[in-house]
Image (spheres, grey):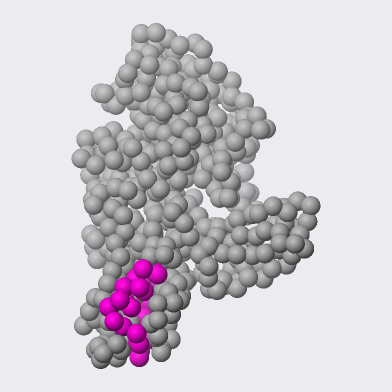
Amino acid sequence: MRRTSASLVAGALVATLAWASSPTSPATALDPSPGVADLVQDINQILGDSRLTVGRAAVVVKSAANGEELYATDAGKLMTPASNTKLFTSAAAAETLGLDYRFDTSVLAGGRRVGSALTGDLVLRGTGDPTMLAADYDALAAKVADAGVKLVTGKLVADDTWFDSVRLGQDWAWDDETAYYAAQISALTASPDTDYDAGSVIVSVAADGDKVKVTTTPETDYLKIVNKATVGAETDVLIERQHSTNTVVITGTVADPYDEWVAVDNPTAYSASLFRKALTKHGVRVLGPTVTGAAPANATELTKHQSMPLSQLLVPFLKLSNNMHAEILTKAMGRKVSGQGTWSAGLKVTSDFAAANGVKVLNLRDGSGLSRRDGVTPTSITQLLLAVRGKPWYQTWYDALPIAGNADRFTGGTLRNRMRNTPAANNVHAKTGSLTSVTSLSGYVTSADGEPLVFSILLNQYLSGSPKDIEDKIAVRLAKFSRANPDNTVQLRSETPAADSPDLECSWLKPAEC
């Protein structure tokens, strides 16, 4: 799913071989009822898959009705959760910011009005809105023109001081720096479409006669395109931004249209470029250059744009596992609670929220799970899943989780192609997670008896292809669980998905539509 350096592969190999010397012991039934004993036996056999021989598996299943532990193996072991981290971030955001929370993007006048002229600076100030599109910056520019401003004698000031200037997570892989799913975090940013991948641009290539045509969404000259691609019999093209620049080099051959989501360098400057272009379009001339800085204390608001409320943002955030939403919300929580839009302040809010709700053993380094130093236990995840069921915002949050087997992209999300035509379909509401040698699935399922269950499955340090089918087998088995009527029809031996089946590992990656 992600490119991995040789050092990371070597580290994973050492760790997995060390783990192989002390294999996980199978769980035993705590409840003597035949249904529970049968469930434990089946999950143990599912986890006996050879792909996990050198890997680590930590699994917990509990009844949401009374908290009873139905299954546990390595329940207290610290594991890399990948995007299961978003369960903590999203829940803390719902609690701390509230479902009505909105991001404001404002335009302010930093000087006096003299007729149609503003004698001073024009300020674009952001608070982190990940849903800002080029069309939204255009609408702000139109409102400036409608307010009668035609000339700005000063500068265009991009104010991104709501957050700090640290753009990338300190543990993120260097070779992900240009990837849309690891885009830079800023209080001023822009998304290319309504998936709201903040800080990225879609670069598209298509054969146009004997040449390759390149376009961007939105249309922008912020990126420098170096097109070395040629028209060929098949599409085998690489679209890659050079590190720490905004130069995008395109190589290879193009037959069919192809899109690549590319993270920009410095989303503040990118957003300001979109706004400045829109001002020109609407007849507003800015004489000075574009700079970054804080708005003057006496600046007055000309207009502003408000984002959708958090209740709606949770849908693309959780359904599509949007990393940038997680990090922006983390800094937004820090800003609200301590006045500091930093990772450290925001992560403290999330950790404090978890602790206040009885969650133990939590080590968070970011809000999305991109960091390999994030560490949770399956017990801590199930503790969270149980605790939030009593929250006033729970139903909205629960509905925003991916739903197994539901083909609608904004309903099924990253689970839309998984567990179809099984008892888990339209039943399991859970968060997925993927990194190289890491996969996770944690959430809710209703048993065959109608008993609500919570579960957490964390698989780490395997060297094979993605074992997400193991997660699916466990989730389906939980959907068939009955205390009174043991089920022996579950397929116990794991197998690699068929070659023509969707690539389960890339269920949230673009441009793949898994």
Q: In the figure, 267 relative to 74: above or below?
A: below
The image quarter containing residue 62 is top left
Can you say which quadrant of the picture contains the C terminus? top right
Q: In the figure, 211 relative to 327: above or below?
A: below
Q: In the figure, 456 relative to 309: above or below?
A: above
For image coordinates 22% across by 39% down, the residue present is 391
User: Residue 244 appears at what percent x and percent y?
Assistant: 56, 71
For image coordinates 26% across by 90% down, the residue present is 115
Is 333 included in the stretch rendered in magenta? no
Query: How many dots with numbers?
Result: 0
Magenta stretch in the rendered image: 137-166
For image coordinates 27% across by 78% down, the residue present is 147
Going by the image, does 456 lie left or right of 22?
Answer: left
Out of 435 and 25, give the one closest to the viewer.
435
User: Residue 319 appears at what percent x and percent y?
Assistant: 42, 43
Q: Is residue 67 visible?
A: yes
Is 143 included in the stretch rendered in magenta? yes
The image quarter containing residue 110 is bottom left
Q: Is residue 7 visible?
A: no
The image quarter containing residue 358 is top left
For image coordinates 53% across by 22% down, the residue present is 46
User: Residue 316 appears at what percent x and percent y?
Assistant: 40, 48
Going by the image, does 278 lie left or right of 237?
Answer: left
User: Residue 313 appears at what percent x and percent y?
Assistant: 34, 50
Out of 217 and 397, give the one closest to the viewer.
217
